[in-house]
Image (cartoon, coloured by chain):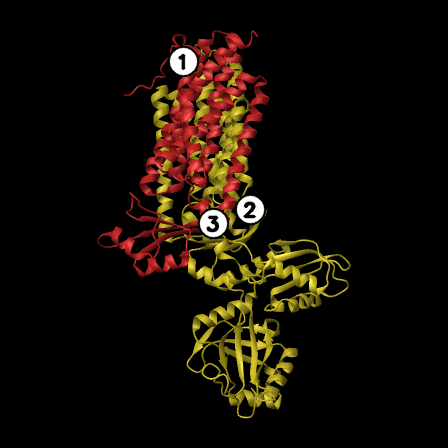
Chain colours: A red, B yellow
Amino acid sequence: MVDIAVPEVDYTQYSNRQLVVVPLTVLAVALVVILGWYVMTGAPANLGLEFTGGTELRVDVDGENPREQIDAAFSAEPQSVQQVAGDGAYIISFREGEVSSTQLENEANEAGFEILTIDQVSPSFGADTQLMALGGIAVAFTGMSLLVFGMFRTFVPSIAVVASAFSDIMIPLAMMNLLGIDLTLGTVAALLMLIGYSVDSDILLNNSILRRTGDFYESTHRAMRTGVTMTLTSMSAMAVMTVVAYIFGIQIMTAIGFILVVGLMADLMNTYLLNVSLLRWYVHEGIKR
Amino acid sequence: MIGKIKANWRVTLLIVFVLAAMIVLFVPAFDASEEEIGNESQQAQGLTNLQYGLDLAGGTRIRAPLIGMTAEDVEFGGDSEADVAATVANELPDTGTNDVIARQEFEDEPGTVEVVDPDVSETEFASAMDASGYEYGEIRNGVTAATREEAISVLDGKVNQAGLSGSTVQEVASGTGEFFILVEVPGEDRQDVIELIQERGEVRIDIYHQGDDGNYTTEREALTRNDFQSIGTATQNDQSGPHVPVTVNRDSAEEFQQLAVDTGVAGPGGSRCTYDQDPENTEPCMLLVVDDEVVNSFGMNPGLADSMQSGSWAQDSSFILTTNSFEEAQRISINLRAGALPAELDILGGTTSFISPTQGENFRTNALIVGILSVLTVAGVVFLRYREPKVALPMVVTAFSEVIILLGFAAYLGYPLDLAVIAGFIAVIGTGVDDLIIIADEVMSQGNVSSRKVFDSRFKKAFWVIGVAAATTIIAMSPLAVLSLGDLRGFAIFTILGVIVGVAITRPAYGDILRYLMTDR
């Protein structure tokens, strides 16, 4: 049987600077990617159908050469064609253009495809949604920050939690850009969810170090044992959800799962490298000032 | 026994909630959908009382704004609503009174004027308002709340008249303050629904005849919806083809009879209409007009014309509207029964989605598989980590009970499950187990827990972390729960609900169970 033991890291071997450099570099790279995306495309991420407007069809195609049939069937150029692993259906998406969704629907029917789902979003509605989603993330993040500052009432431990949560959101966002995953409502929800998940282990660590008597390293190890278990458990559940939902072509679950897996990985790094070193500096030097 | 229940009241509470959830889920009498009339078909045809959303049941969802502009704070100056509407409509070159709605809730107070003609621009509307001489405030995009309400009740009538049971029509607001009408019709194709709801459905009968000067003129609105006493369903027979039988009410019947005789439709021997072949050379016609478009034209048979001439028709006043096809007859019947929409829906300005019933069923099964596999994974990891069934088994059982309680809530509230909600459940299991791990680790830290006192103090410490984490999750998800970001509302609501159930019921209970197993009583 596999034994899951949380590794004990000997933090004494590394200086704060050494510990911090890894998460900060990763965050910097992520920010560069997101900024670059913004400069190049005018948006921080690849915006999905819900934000840009457009039409997405999920169809069953019978017969030979389904890809060619799809290419021949529509009068508009699909933006992407994707096959669902589980049942062989095709997900075809079109950017909003001259061809209306009703015409695309008719063309699919004429080509003899069985239409399983159709989603159509108008560009103006998409722009609204974009604004709301951004606002939602901003409100959620601010609310979380206020709560954390209110709970700890000291600057360094609070900013450690907030910085780590910020990084936990940015890293998956950059990852999505690099892997060509679209930002959809599902991924926005996952990013918000990540705020909750991320704060969990950070608070545990802060609490363990600040509210306990005892050695810094001992407290850190104790919190880490619990925190890593937590994160690994959630991560494995989300990984399974991502893979299975991908096979079945359930996009919203795949998106939520994927973001959480990447975000939780980032959280492991941020909590136990960035957060730990900030707290160590605070406990050993910051308080004395 | 009672003492034991008291001492472990947290566990008791959990058991009570799980049992209540089971009852709500499985006992048919607790079916929430029975209270909501018109929701029957959304209810699962399965073992449980759960209702499924369109994702999982199949159907069409259309979210669209109503087309129109509103001039606010209009001084009516003592004129009636109808007068104001007519005056403003007069100033707009191609807009009829049907496209202008004036509303004044209280006399002597400013009212509103709406223009619902898609071809009128804001400047045109403003200059028409200026020309009409009524003082007004600003002109904004969108229609009034009263118009939206009217539209919702008409749409409700339309989907019900069309026999689409389980449909819902409601209003949703976007974060930017725009209002949308949300129509959900289970099991129906997208185009059928669009066809049903996109036209305003203003049905009227005009009489087209040769005037005294020899030119053809149209008597508009010889009959409108309000003139009918009863409207039959679409019928088809050999004698009259597809048609809708109607009865005209007493007052209008006399008038219509007179008009028909005067215009010559009910001339001696009836009339033969050739409007569609040669409108410049036809006997008088009745025109069936839907949204200002002539859909059919017909004359009158000698029998009916005779009874109109003699004046006896007004006593009986039944009548048929013939159409070109049965589908058209159905549409006309629905439009007459449900009434006309006060404004057109801008279907292209919103979102539409369609999920075929088979795909919905696949999603249902597949989402269930995803859920079960995720939960099994969590259970597996927990067992591998703790090795001790004493700790791990109650953990898994507690996490499961959390999901059951949430499902119970969903069934009780009649909240339709969709893919996003199921993803929310899985996320809840994730956070739930996280918190149980915190409790277990905290309680078991530093050796054995022998006394109740030690246990309680450790449990309290763990709970502080859990409380803060729960509060953050609730804050993070609340924007989604409040904003109408479509599918994600359910996800947010159930994540928040899950966190609350967890902190209030399941996690304390797990603490009690653990204490029972760990301490020497």
Q: Where residue A123 is drawn, which disc sits there?
A: 3
- Residue in front for this viewpoint, A130 or B19: A130
Q: Considering the numbered disc 1 on the image, is that residue within a helix, a strand or a loop?
A: helix
Direction bottom: furthest residue? B268
How much space separates mark 1 and mark 3, taking CA atoms? Answer: 47 Å
Residue B47 percent location from the top left of the image: 41, 46
The residue under label 2 is B174
Question: The disc numbered 3 marks a residue on which chain?
Answer: A
Residue A72 visible (yes or no): yes
- Residue at the image point whose x is 53% and y is 58% from the top: B345
How far is the residue under mark 3 from the one under mark 2? 14 Å
- Marks 1/2: CA–CA distance: 47 Å
Q: Is residue B183 visible?
A: no
Between discs 1 and 3, the one toward the N terminus = 1
- Residue A286: x and y in percent read 54, 10
In the picture of the structure, the residue carrying the numbered disc 1 is A18
What residue is drawn where x is 57% and y is 81%? B207
Q: Amino acid at mark 3?
A: Pro
